[in-house]
Amino acid sequence: MKIAIASGKGGTGKTTLSTNLASYLAETNKVVLTDLDVEEPNSGLFLKSELIYSEDKYKMIPQWKESDCTLCGICQEACNYHAVIQIMDSIMVFPELCHSCYACSELCPTNALPMIPKKMGELKHYKTEQFHFVEARLSIGEEQAVPLIKQTLKYIDSNYGNDYLKIYDSPPGTSCPVIEATKEADFVILITEPTPFGLNDVILAIETMQELHKDFGIVINRYGIGNNDIVNYCHNNNIPILAKIPNDKEIAILYSKGELLYNSIPAVKAELEKIAQYISALSANYLPTQIPKNN
Amino acid sequence: MKEIVVISGKGGTGKTSITASLAVLGGKEVVVADCDVDAADMHILLQPENLKSEDFYSGELAVLDQNLCTQCGNCFDVCRFDAISVNNGIHQVVDLSCEGCGYCARVCPVDAIKNIPLNVGKWHIANTRFKQPMVHAKLGIGADNSGKLVAHVKNIAKEIADQYNRKYVLVDGSPGVGCPVVSSLSGAHFVILVTEPTVSGLHDLKRVYELVAKFNLRAGCIINKSDLNTSKSKEIMQFFKHKNIIHLADLPYDEAFTHAMTNCKTIVEEDDSAIKTILEQVWERVKTEVRNKN
Amino acid sequence: MKIAFTTKGSQWDSKMDPRFGRTEYFLIYDETADTLTAVNNKDTENEAHGAGPKAAQRLAEQKAKILITGNGPGGNAATVLQKLGVDCYINAGDMSVKEAYEAFKAGQLKKL
């Protein structure tokens, strides 16, 4: 079963929930946690783990072969991203701007722009005492998160079968990388704070999940601060609230040190157990296809 | 007119709350530009009254005309993004997967595919409850923020500032390290980095600072929730000292921030708040720094 | 020698534009012929991404050897300018074109 953890905005506790939930579930399940927030992967900072495998990840970009080029200009005209431009009598390629669409390469009449692999990031596979953890990290300057997310999902699918609970720490926001990271998930957990900012951002995330026809539930972080608007919103719209992690300065302090919470704070453990039960009820009915939301 | 940009790298550090507070302190000297369009929350605190809205287009999207299509499959063959689906022999564009590269349109033998500008959302000119001009934007689902949108929001804000003689454009910058944050920083006179003393706060701050350095920008920093982890705060301070970044202020961990936000207010509107005094000093310092440039 | 400025207008007293990729104009001063030519760059505003390389390409056509600008070009544009052998002078974003030229002549601008 695949569970994605997402949020409308950054800094609401997405990584905290991912790492704690993965650890907690791993006490009774086979678990693999994947950090898909490839621009800023932070889960690893919170886990004590041993690196067992790593590989560079590549995207395909065109490479100019000066000897075969007639400077006809078709390539720069074909590129919608200005990743290939002609400067005086040479062709320059900007790898970070390239989307790997192959248009310049395949439309070149003299095959002067063959596609070659270019490193766009790294995938690292770690083992903690209880579970497996995979993180992908985009190289600085790279702008295309989606291809790296796709390749990372493929790595997980080919290495872990249906007997694993797969947890994905998704990128924040509602743009393409989030959609890619949650597209294949059986269930999405949206985490938010009970504040006007949190409500505004989680509504955007909810609309995105509805558009993708995802089954999802809400976890409220820092419950007790702010107001009750998010609880009311969920009730009025029949959205399940899976757990309420209390507002507690002690939690913020543990987080700042990069430590897991539930062993020190029983209230967090109790809330994780609620999520675990919800997931186990879901997986009892789980078919390895997408479950449409019933309403 | 001087442009002051606030960025943080990581979410949840209090960047927007602090930017909104500085906007309130700046009063009528300020035009506000919200470039954090992925999580545009500043309007919650400043409650702007909308004056003007326009659609915004960024990037392109392939559109297939079934009346012309011969279902030859050329488009399907060249698309690297799985953005052409085939159902019962009928080819269609999957909008959310299309990256607008235009390759399909080029290989279509009957010109059944056109690339059209992609509507990604709206931008607005508004008037905050402090009677300041504010420019902000809202993206649609699955739409990516772009350098273009950020540049557009900033340009409108700067035009307004010139027209109405406002001294400062205060920009709530985009998150991350990609094109939008590059565009947020481009043209800035001063950068305020907001961070928190957590392992991820420092980690992300270092990544975003590389961009600030690349643009040769002068920067100052606010460490929010500084007392959460004093050893991490010290580590951040060391980093700043080393990089010649002005240490503007430490703000204590204080739920008053959230309480103010819950009432849709900024913290500087709360009476007898210690944070208010600190932020007033920050704003004065930033103004001095901007004036003394070069 | 030809000197390029990133500007908001086409005159000596126009303001400099601190940006490179999305600058409104390139103003080209030909020292030998003593002519000032404005090249409109406003259409890069329509580029979602890749404004830097496009602007650099436009500048290449002008064959300027010196660029005077505000914050300095981003990574991609810098690569092109380096290849073209254009020297970049920065921190002139708040000046008029005339002031920027004088500051350059007086050796007051920082070279990248």
Image (cartoon, coloured by chain):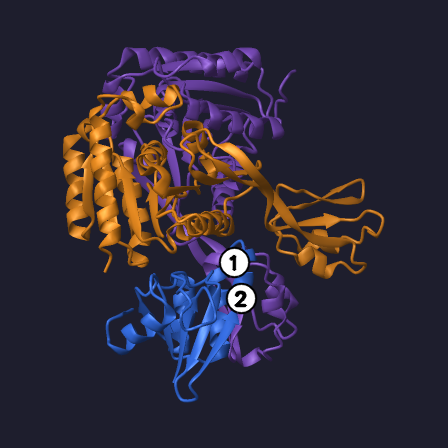
Chain colours: A purple, B orange, C blue
Q: Is residue B33 left or right of residue C40?
A: left
Q: CA distance from mark 1 to mark 2?
A: 8 Å
Residue B9 is drawn in which quadrant? top left
Classify C107 as above or below C7.
below
| Disc 2 secondary structure class | strand
- Pointers 1 and 2 in contact (CB under 8 A)? yes
Q: Which chain letter matches label 2?
A: A
Q: Is residue C48 left or right of residue B274?
A: right
Q: Which chain letter matches label 1?
A: A
Q: Amino acid at mark 2?
A: Val
Residue A173, image x and y in percent?
47, 35
Towards the viewer: B122 or B103 = B122
Towards the viewer: A263 or A233 = A233
Q: Is residue C17 left or right of residue B208?
A: right
Towards the viewer: C88 or A117 = C88
Res A163 seen here: no
Classify A83 as above or below A131.
below
Q: Residues within 10 Å of mark 1 (few under 14, many from 20)?
A: many
| Disc 1 secondary structure class | loop
Towards the viewer: B99 or A183 = B99
Q: Kindly identify which residue carries mark 2.
A: A84
Which residue is located at x 66 percent, y 58 percent? B103
Which residue is located at x 33 percent, y 65 percent? C95
Q: Kindly identify which residue carries mark 1.
A: A98
